[in-house]
Amino acid sequence: MSEKSMIESMEEIAAAVDIEYATVEGFVPGQEFRIGSLTAGDLIEWSEANDGPAKRTAGLRLITKSLVNSKGVRYAADPKNIEVFRAKSHKVTERIVKEILKLNGMEVKTDGVKDAKKD
């Protein structure tokens, strides 16, 4: 059992690395994506920008912000990459978005019913 330590300063909070990773099935069999959890700021920005035309690309914006390579570097965050995902299967992009939301501790709606968050 590890010993817990008490945080004593904002510097310690700022220095803590708390990114979680997961892999999700890609667009073709055998292909996987690695996704990384988002910051509170990323999710606030995403939720506040989901009005008007931006609402149509909300899921695609989450994908581009979440994709990371094997070293944890976010490689798709440029908004121009939304166009790449517009041309991909809606069924697959929706599945990836659901995985991103779950990784970030958010409830996912399925068939009009929210999935319960399981801890």
Image: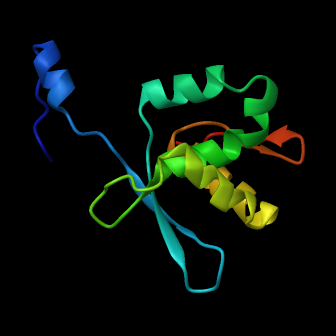
Q: Residue furthest top?
A: 9
Confirm whether residue 43 shows in the render. Answer: yes
Where's residue 29, x and y in %?
Answer: 63, 85
Question: Which of these two is toward me, 56 or 5?
Answer: 56
Confirm whether residue 100 shows in the render. Answer: no
Residue 29 vertical placement versus 112 (above, below): below
Where's residue 85, x and y in %?
Answer: 67, 59
Please report the residue visible at 10 percent of the width from the left and 28 percent of the height from the top: 5
Residue 95 quadrant: bottom right
Where's residue 83, x and y in %?
Answer: 67, 55
Please report the residue visible at 85 percent of the width from the left and 40 percent of the height from the top: 113
> What colour scheme governs how the chains and residues are painted in the rendered image of this protein?
rainbow
Residue 13 quadrant: top left
Q: Is residue 111 left or right of residue 37?
A: right
Q: Is residue 7 left or right of residue 114?
A: left
Please report the residue visible at 63 percent of the width from the left and 25 percent of the height from the top: 47
Q: Is residue 20 left or right of residue 59?
A: left
Residue 36 vertical placement versus 87 (above, below): above
